[in-house]
Image (cartoon, rainbow, N blue to C red):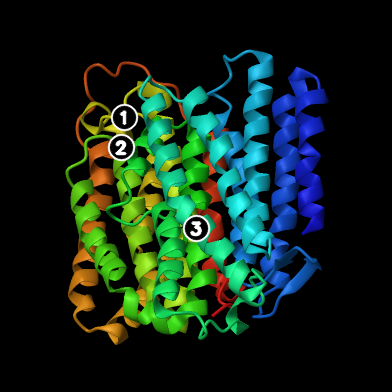
Amino acid sequence: MLMILTATLMLFPTVWLLPFSWLWPATLLHSMTIAAVGVTIPKNLAHTGWYEINPYMAVDALSAPLICLTCWLLPLSILASQKHVQHDPENRQRLFLSVLVILQLAIIMAFAVTDMVMFYIMFEATLIPTLIAITRWGSQWQRLNAGAYFLFFTLAASLPLLIAILYLCKITGSACFIMLPYIGLTHVSSIAQLMWWFGCVVAFMVKMPLYGMHLWLPKAHVEAPIAGSMVLAAVLLKLGGYGLMRVSPVLAPLTMKACYPFMVMALWGVIMTGSICLRQTDLKSLIAYSSVSHMGLVAAGILTQTDWGFTGALVLMIAHGLTSSALFCLANTNYERTHSRTMLLVRGMQMVLPLMTIWWFIASLANLALPPLPNLMGELMIITSLFNWSWWTIIITGAGTLITVGYSLYMFLMTQRGYLPPHIIALEPTHTREHLLMALHLLPLILLVLKPELFWGWS
C-alpha cells in the first residue's frame, strides 16, 4: 500500500520535469505500473481481517477492491483524455494531469485511513480537484453552474457529518474504524443516537447519491471532461457507499428502525431514475441517471444490514464502476467525432464505426446485468436480501430491473442502429487507443466472474 502511495506521489516529478514530448507516454506507463501493483491488493487481502500499514492507515477486504479500482481508473482516465486536452498549452496539460494525480491520492487515502476525522478530511479533499476539473476543462459555459451545484450539495451535506464525527470522538474518545464495531453507545440518549446516525447517513446518501439528493450529479456528469466523468462515476460515488458500510454497523439496531425513509427513497429512485432514462435525449445525462438508479439499489442493500446485502452492494459498486466508466468513454468517442450528445443527431453509428458497435453492445449488456457478469451477482444478492427484509420489495426491484433492460437497449439502439443522419459526412475511424481503453474496462469484469472471491471476502 505504501508502495502505491509513494509511486503515486512520484507522478508529480514525472508530470512536471519530463520533456513535453515524453509527458503523456511516460505518465501513462507510470500510472499503468501503479495499476498493476494495485491489482495485487485484493489477492493478498481476501479475508475479513485488517492489514495495518501504520497507526493511521489500514486495508481490509472492503477497502482493498475499491483502492484497486481507483488505481485502475487513473491510467484509463489519462488514456481517454489525450484528445480532449491536446490543444491546450503545455503547462495546462501538466496541470490537468496533476489534478488527476491529486484526486487519486485523496481517494486512496479516504479508502485507507482508519480514523474518521482523517476520512472526513480526505472525503472533502476530493471536492477540490473534481471541482477544478469540471469548471476548468468542461466543454460548455454551464460547467460553472454544475460546479456550483456540486460544491453546494457536497458542503451542505458534509457539515452534519463533521458534527457527528466530533460528537463521536467526544463521547467515546475514539473515532477509529477498527474500533467502531466494538464501541457501545448505550449510555447515549436515543435522540443523540438518532441525530448522530442521521448526520452520518445524509452526507453519504448525497455522495452516492440517493434519489431526491441527486440533482448535482447529472449536471456534473454532463459538463465534466471525460476524465472527470469516469472518476466521478467509477470511484467518487462509491465513497458514499463505503462510508455508509463503515458507519451503519455501529448503530445497527437504530439503522433497522430509522432506515425506512431512506429505503423507500432508494427503491423509489430505482424506478423513477430508470423511467427518466427512457425519456432522455442527452447521452451523458442518460448514463448519469442510470448511475443514480444503480446506486439506489446499492443503498437499499446496505440498509438491510445483512451479509448478503453488504456483499451484493460491494460487488455491484465495483461492477458498476467499470461499466459506467466504459459507457462514458463510449459516449466520448461519439462526442469527439460529432460534437453532439443528442442521440437523435448521432444515431446510425454502426454504419461508420462497426467495431465500436461491438463495444457498445457489450457495455450495454453489462449495464443491464447480463449473466454471468458481476453486475448480475450484485443485483441478485441485493434483491434477495431485500426480499427477506420485505417481500413487497420484489415488485419494485423487478420493475426496476425491467426498466434497466429497457433503457439500456434504448441507448444502444438509438446510438448504433437506424439511418445515418445526413449531416454526418466524414468521421475519423476508431483508434487503437480507444479499443485498448474499452478492453481495459471490460476485461476486468471477466476476471471478476472467474475470481469472485477477490471482493467477496468482506461481510
In front of the other: 192 or 333 = 192
* Residue denoted by label 1: 341
Relative image position of residue 116 (x, y in whole percent): 62, 62
Relative image position of residue 249 (x, y in whole percent): 50, 78
420 left or right of 296 in image: left
Q: Residue at x 53, y 51 (%)?
A: 235
Q: Earlier in the sequence, mark 1 or mark 3?
A: 3
188 left or right of 254 in image: right
Relative image position of residue 442 (x, y in whole percent): 50, 53
Q: Residue at x 57, y 71 (%)?
A: 455
Q: Earlier in the sequence, mark 1 or mark 2?
A: 2
Considering only vertical position in the picture, is 227 above or below 54? above
Q: Is residue 31 visible?
A: yes
* Circle 1 SS class: loop
In front of the other: 444 or 287 = 287
Query: How many numbered marks appear?
Result: 3
| Amino acid type, label 3 | Leu
Considering only vertical position in the picture, is 218 above or below 66? above
Q: CA distance from mark 1 to mark 3?
A: 37 Å
Cβ atoms under marks 1 and 2 closer than 8 Å = yes
Q: Give me the disc on residue 161.
A: 3
Cβ atoms under marks 3 and 2 closer than 8 Å = no
| Amino acid type, label 2 | Leu
Q: Residue at x 51, y 63 (%)?
A: 164
* Neighbourhood count class around disc 2 (C-alpha, 10 Å): few under 14, some 14–19, many 20 upward: many
Relative image position of residue 205 (x, y in whole percent): 40, 58
* Residue denoted by label 2: 283
* Neighbourhood count class around disc 3 (C-alpha, 10 Å): few under 14, some 14–19, many 20 upward: many
149 left or right of 424 in image: right
Number of the front mark, 3 or 2: 3
* Circle 3 SS class: helix
